[in-house]
Image (cartoon, helix red, strand yellow):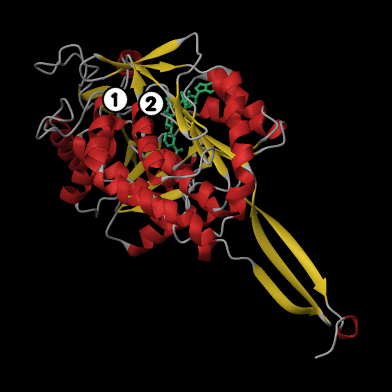
Amino acid sequence: MSQNGNLLNYVNGAWQKSSAGNYGKVLNPATAEVLSNVPLSPGSEVDVAVQAANKAFGEWRRMPVGDRIQFLFKFKNLLETNLDAIARTITNEAGKTYNESVGEMRRGIENVEVACGMPVLIQGINNEDIASGIDEHMFRQPLGVVAAITPFNFPGMIPLWFLPYAVATGNCFILKPSEKVPMTSQKLFELINEAGFPAGVLQLVNGGKETVDALLDHPSVRAISFVGSTPVAKYIYSRATANGKRAQCQGGAKNPVVIMPDADMDTTTRIMGDSAFGCAGQRCLAASVAITVGEAKNSFTEAMADVATSRKVGYGLDSGIQMGPVITNESKTRIENLINVGAQEGANVLVDGRNHTVGGYEDGYFIFPTILDNVKIFGPVLSLMHANTIDEAIALVNNRAYGNMACLFTSSGSAARKFRYEADAGNVGINIGVAAPMAYFPFSGWNDSFFGDLHAQSRHGVEFYTQTKVVVERWPQEWSRQF
Ligand code: NAD
């Protein structure tokens, strides 16, 4: 929802014009065209939203969970019927292909479906006669007002990693989406409005650092969910927890994939093409380093170069396009500089994606698939490293700060088991290029890819958004009227 091209916030059940003095520009990365202006909302607007959420919380938490999820069922149906429009919005502001945009929404919608199972998921535990005549129960109760701060690369899916669990468990939720891609959230909130959630239960406040800091410092915000780059994840985690809040902060990644010589190279390179170059390499689960073992060095390298050069790059709404632009001109320059540095430091630029343009989209922020061979650093393009044994390859996998994902391609069960057991990463793939946990599992980043205890999605989401209350009770017969 916008007024004269300026996006609105959704606060207390209505679209509201921000009083922001500053607006950012939302650009289509394929065309560099300005799509809208996004308000960088001041802290005072966060306070208004938190107060509305606090007010709504009293009734929302008392509503039976079976009634709360009826709003999510409506929301899920609206997401299905509006899938095409949402996917087009994602492609236009984030640059991914139409199919990638539909794919991310499917993964997001799964989370709404899982949260619709909240009447079962939220059940507590109990013991009768924990001591003689004494029963003990554990209930899960909502926290109150919670908030999420989300990144540019999955504008539809990532808000849905949090929002459905937060409200199904009885909390009131505030979203601060990435100011680079705020238009997808506008679409989500148009549907939230249509689904009829009570005022104050779900709110959208656009903005940047000042808006985030107001959420981190507000005494009534009880929990913060964050996804973005590692330096910001660390900052948010420390500031939120210093203020006594729960925090789950997912950070950046550079994901290694090990290729054994016995892997089926056709399948492996096809899957690796999607992992490394899908979503223009901007997935947090993109393969960024391929580590070949033994003779895979030759067979994989050649086939992978073919896959990279044949990928069709362009505007994501045009048919047959397999890869869109990167998000901003600054990202394009930064990635090109990293390739330059890699080349200067002795890497062989096997496939060079620099200095290409797409006809009709000369202003777009395009970088074509790039492969650097023999690099000693992890880069934002597919880098190749070579090992002699699986132990050497696993040592390379584990010798890094991040731990979002590690994958192995092989036809050997024992190599697969060894890798699964020893890889130092929270999401592991065997013959899988993007090991993204489905909504029924937690999204388990480790090390510098995650700060906190409980991850996004599924049961972790339920635990994160609830506090446990244990009740110990005794009802001696002699105290009650006898029947
Ligand atoms: P980012 O860290 O720049 O921004 C993320 C959010 O934080 C945005 O909403 C932004 O407004 C806010 N923000 C940015 N700087 C801030 C500051 N100094 N203080 C307070 N708030 C601030 O990330 P991005 O560029 O939007 O997203 C890409 C990053 O996200 C990549 O590093 C990617 O790997 C990571 N990511 C991780 C996962 C995961 O599951 N671990 C998933 C998706 C993306």
Evaluate whether residue 32 shows in this view.
yes
Q: Position of residue 245 (x, y in %)?
A: 67, 37
Residue type, label 1:
Glu
Assign a secondary structure to mark 1. helix
Say which residue appears at 24% left-offset and 23% top-offset.
Answer: 325
Q: Residues within 10 Å of mark 2 (few under 14, many from 20)?
A: many
Q: Position of residue 25 (x, y in %)?
A: 36, 13
- Say which of 290 and 374 sits in front: 290
Looking at the image, residue 70 lies above or below residue 239:
below
Q: Earlier in the sequence, mark 2 or mark 1?
A: 1
Q: Residues within 10 Å of mark 1 (few under 14, many from 20)?
A: many
Query: How many labels sit on residues?
Result: 2
Q: CA distance from mark 2 to mark 1?
A: 8 Å
- Say which of 442 and 89 sits in front: 89
Assign a secondary structure to mark 2. loop
Check contact, mark 2 vs mark 1: CB within 8 A: yes
- Picture quadrant of residue 297: top left
Left or right relative to 109: residue 100: left
Residue ID for mark 2: 182
Left or right relative to 468: residue 33: left
Residue type, label 2:
Pro
Residue ID for mark 1: 93
Say which residue appears at 32% left-offset and 14% top-offset.
Answer: 4
